[in-house]
Image (cartoon, coloured by chain):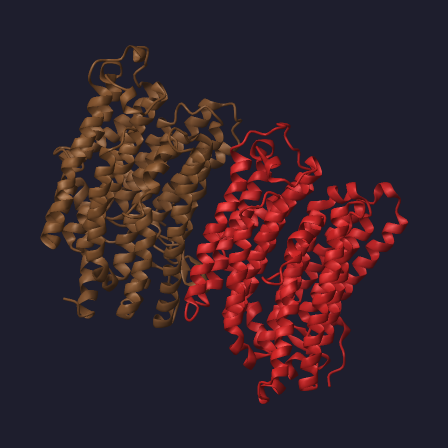
Amino acid sequence: MMPFDPSALTLEMLVAALGLGVLILGLIVPHGSRHGLGWLSFFGLLGIMGVALSMWGDNRELLSGMYLLDNYALFWKITFMLSAALVILGCMRYVDSMGGQAEYYSMIIFATLGMMVMASAGDFITLYLGLELMTIAFIILVCFRKMEAKSVEAGMKYILLAGMSSAVLLYGLSLLYGLTGSVIILEVSRIIALQPVTPALVLAVVMLVAGLGFKISAVPFHMWTPDVYEGAPTPVTSFLAMGSKAASFAILLRLFIAGLPGIWENWTMVVAILAAVTIIFGNLVAIPQTNVKRLLAYSSIAQAGYILVGLVTATEAGIKGVMFYAFLYVFATVGAFTVATYFYHVTGSDELKDYAGLSQRSPLMAAVMLVAMLSMAGIPPLAGFVGKFYLFKTIVDGYLWLVFIGLIMSMVSVYYYLRVALVMYRDEPADPTPIKLPSPVAVTLIVAMVVTLVIGIYPGPLSEVVNEAAHTFFMH
Amino acid sequence: MEFPILLTILLAPVAAALILAFVPKEEHMLIKCVAAVGTFVSLALSLFAYFTYDKTVGGLQFVFGHNVTWIKDLGVTFFLAADGISLPMLLLTNLIGFSAVFASWNVNNRPREFFILLMLLITGVMGTFIAHDLFIFLLFYEVVVIPIYILVIIWGSSKRVTKEYAGMKLTIYLLIGSAFLLVGVIALFVKTTALAGTPDMSFTGLAQAAAQLSRFDQIWLFALMLFGFGSLVSMWPFHSWSPDGYAGAPTAVSMIHAGVLKKIGGYGLVKIAVYMLPVGASFWAPYMAVLGVCGVAYAALGALAQKDLKYIVGYSSVSHMGYVILAVACLDVIGLNGAVANMFAHGVMAALFFSMIGFIYEKTHTRWIPDLGGLARQTPRLAAGFMLAALASLGLPGLVSFIPEFTIFISSFHNYGGLAVIGIAGIIITALYVLRAGANTLFGPPRPEYDHLQDIRGPEMVPLVVLGTVLVVGGLLPSLLFDVINSSVVPLHAAISDALQIGGKF
């Protein structure tokens, strides 16, 4: 057995140190200068991302497979840190008005840490540890506006349902342990391959699907999503929509494709149906929404359905599709939710009708909202189109019906996205005062928009990187 | 290195849009001039490209970026090229784009946003015609959807249908069509990659690999593409967006939409669907011919019943596109020549028609024929433009649309006999409704309420001069058009008939 090399955990240790540092500094510095904590967290995460980039290509197993270091995990970690950094950059003004900066930023950083542990988890215990770290941080974040009934209600719902889904997942994991006598994913896969499919195994898989289905809010496990997304502070919603979802996809792939390879092939039809139902439901229910956050919540359910498409084939191409889509989804989500955050900060409203004339009050906000939404809808030349191309090309042979459903529903989604465009562009504003954007918000918006456009027009480089990352998935 | 003429043509309007973003929004005149200059550069360069295209060699010319790897694992290259089929379309886009700027000279409500969107729209349309890579083609294909939607909902008119309805109908029809097209493209790509071993998204590469597809695959893939491109070219029965959409859209959008955007559908049918899937095409050709003839007859009768000028032209454009479908269905050299030439001719004519109707509406605030009359007395230049477009619409010899229609009749009669007779009969109805519309709008006793009207003048004359010149010159010298088209249709047809012979069809 190889000696344990602590330098392999550099990233996780740095992030933990950053989180603790922000928390402690919050106690020391006076009230007036606490907004600097946001900048500290932002630049701290950027710096750690720089370290992460230097670890590219370092592929190994630690502690006989308990912790996996590979490009696959590293790509996810960079995605999580990037989304955390962008969320922090876009919401500093909002957090200043809410108070409690130190706790807020450190919770975001700890949630990120949880996600990073999930990405590298090679056994059930590590996986569960990361998952809980993330979930508990999110519970605190969701009810951060503790004086508002909606936020507290969202927190209650999230704590109950997250707890329940964790329990279900744990049942599934312990059943698997009981069947195989191992918690290490790679070993489990070796042992299971030799066993016949028993009812207990089927039950375990069902529980895993249900438990993780909650996290990615796939229909029919999506019930909590709209209420929690609406009630939570908007930046938290955006981090929940991209970070938590992406991390859950990272372990979904590991658990099912690496951990249950033989079994998974019997399940692809179930996943295909799950994806189809999620896409259809999310898009259809989004149509009548009048609250922008709820609309985005339902659209994010639909987006989860699209990403599920990549799991159907359980091949490298499918994994690549999932990672590519998750990455660009981060930028679309950051764009749309940062607009919503700042709009709420200025007007105190999330209602669609109040977005009237936004294009005249702030052309940048309106443009970013439009670009972000159309990227989610998959309209070229925005990034979402390429992402959908990669996802759907994997299932043409065998699941052509799902390609039809996915693409037709994404055109249906244009209908409700364009309703937002209609309000923003056609209507005259009730209050024509221009909205002045502070520079961090403007930078966040411009980054989100430019990246979405650039990936859409010239996806070559990102696609190469994702190829390298997906390639290491099957190396262990 | 050679001067990248196609790239410059493509990027000139983008550059104009970027400059516009920094022009103060009160400087209306400056905004319009920047837009005019941007489109003029593209127009001048595409005229240059058109006339320097080497017809004796034919095939792809002005090639740019065929070795620039764009997405490696999809085999995408940034391949721009023009041949005798795309050049007339490119020229048409720029003729109409340039005229559309002047037809919108009187837009004074948020002009900066208007012209930025117009520039993006023109860029998207041009991109589809010069892309020689299917992925790049798709990138441009839907770029146009969003500018059009915003242009319609802000600057459109709500005379008979609300502009919101019109905008949404245009958008949803096109997107649902393109969803099916996209399924077809993805499936084609996956299947050809499996056959060829390496991914290649260029038109040529796909066509070569697709030749090995099974007959069944060719047939269902062609059906998807026919649906996608067919709904864009307003093939009956997927045409109903066309009259409503044009009625709600502002003049410039109607011009570009009817003039060139629709033609992307016809262009895609010829250069993508038929070229890559000839076996599928020969299976569906008889059905296409029936749909084409239905479109001709149905839309012509529909136009006969309309009293709104934009609806008449809207239905008439559906009817003319029916001829294009019929011509493509012939799958021979004469038919394909006629299809491409007719798209060019109809584009010029429809754009002129819509710009004149736009001016009539701007000045009289109505498009309702019973409220109009005798305008020839008060606005003679406007009337001249209107009549020129009307006569071109009915295929008067000496104007650009006569020879293309004649070509189509020859080919369709040869291939489909009786069916073609119905199609040809459509021309009688066309004559009936355009002449009646012209007579009731322009002639008869002048109405006193229109005595104060100013005739078109200054910048407003540009659409009439530019498009009118093309109508006449193209009519007198049809070889200018046909020689270029023919130089690329002949090799295309040779490729199709080779594939069909291997497929054991003939």
In the rendered structure, the answer to whether residue B210 lies left or right of residue B499 reads right
Q: Please identify the quadrant where the C terminus of chain A is shown.
A: bottom right
Looking at the rendered structure, the number of numbered marks drawn on it comes to 0
Residue at position x 71%, y 45% from top?
A91
Q: Which chain is red?
A: A
The picture places residue B33, in percent across and down from the top left corner, at 42, 26
Comparing B318 with B29, the one in front is B318
Q: Can you see residue A359?
A: yes
In the rendered structure, the answer to whether residue B247 lies left or right of residue B415 reads right
Comparing B139 with A218, the one in front is A218
Q: Quadrant of residue B313?
A: top left
Specify the colour of chain B: brown
Residue at position x 35%, y 42% from top?
B241
| Above or below B12: residue B76 | below
The picture places residue A405, in percent across and down from the top left corner, at 45, 60
In the rendered structure, the answer to whether residue B417 lies left or right of residue B317 reads left
Comparing A346 with B40, the one in front is A346
Q: Can you see residue A467?
A: no
The picture places residue B155, in percent across and down from the top left corner, at 44, 30
| Above or below B207: residue B261 | above
Residue at position x 52%, y 41% from top?
A419
Q: Please identify the quadrant where the N terminus of chain A is shown.
A: bottom right
The picture places residue B280, in percent across and down from the top left corner, at 25, 62
